[in-house]
Image (cartoon, rainbow, N blue to C red):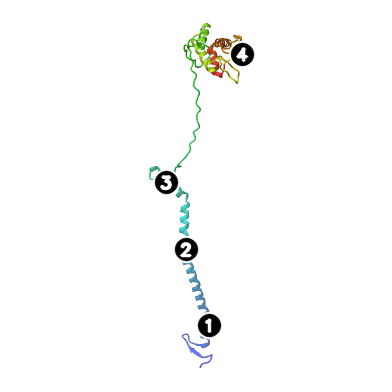
Amino acid sequence: MTSGTEIIPSRTGVAPRTSQRFVRAAARPRLSRRRGVLAAFSVLSTAGFVAASLVPLVSFSSTAQATELDPLSLYASTVADAQRYQAGDAPAVELERASEYTVFVKPTPTPPPAAIVDKSSSGSSTGWRPPFVSPNPGSAQAIAYDMVTARGWGDSEFACLVALWKKESGWRVNAYNASSGAYGIAQATPGRKMASVGSDWETNAATQITWGLRYIKGRYDTPCGAWGKSQRSGWY
């Protein structure tokens, strides 16, 4: 056994054993520090490796989003699609059509027929003039034709008279309009006006025609003048 002051040989000389213990005790904190530094370095290395592994993924995702939202890329894609449609490379698109549909077309009003003017006939009225037709002997029209020519009116005036009274009464001596009270061939309103010519005004065609020609002469001058008024307003 040795004491605390025992001399131990060393390279530098003889050193006491107590000094060697102090050296070992001082070296222990240094080893602990080295171990802590190595542990911290290991943690930092691991974190750096993990970060280096995740950064490319994040970068790739950001690049993909930027590519999708890039206006220039969208514009280029749109232009390419338009060029394909113009070149005829685009696929045909079949459109669905309704099986039943209704088309409304606004009707076009039919214009009234233009009036035909007979410039060869006499009279101041305008419009279509009926042609002359020889009356049947003994008929009311035959009686009227004799009276018309006796007044100096021509066949064209007689044709206007035939059309006028055919429209008014159909050349019937008993034609009666209940709403206006008009009566006879000339449709005198009221019918008793014709009593100024004869008391047989209700049944005699000659009496009615005489009154009717007097009325036309005093009001329209000629049968064609009366016919023109009837064409314009529906009455004479």
| Residue 186 position in % (x across, y down) | 56, 14
Q: Name the residue under label 3.
A: 81
Labels 4 and 2 touching (C-beta < 8 A): no
Disc 1 to disc 4, how far (Cα)?
Answer: 162 Å
Disc 3 to disc 4, how far (Cα)?
Answer: 93 Å
Residue 25's disc number = 1
Secondary structure beneath disc 4?
Answer: helix
Q: Can residue 8 be seen in this view?
A: yes
| Residue 147 position in % (x across, y down) | 53, 8
Q: Mark 2 points at which residue?
A: 54
* Mark earlier in primary sequence (1, 3): 1
Quarter of the image with the C terminus is top right
Q: Name the residue under label 4.
A: 192
* Mark earlier in primary sequence (4, 2): 2
* Amino acid of disc 1: Ala
* Mark earlier in primary sequence (1, 2): 1
Q: Which of marks 3 and 2 is in front?
A: 3
* Amino acid of disc 4: Arg
Quadrant of the rendered image containing residue 181: top right
Q: In this view, does 29 lie to the left or right of 91?
A: right
Please tell me whether residue 228 is drawn above or below residue 74 in the rendered image: above
Seen from the viewer's position, the closer of residues 49 and 209 is: 209
* Amino acid of disc 2: Leu
Q: Nearer the viewer, mark 1 or mark 2?
A: 2
Please tell me whether residue 48 is drawn above or below residue 2 in the rendered image: above
* Amino acid of disc 3: Asp
Secondary structure beneath disc 2?
Answer: helix
Residue at 47% across, 58% down: 61
Seen from the viewer's position, the closer of residues 161 and 66 is: 161
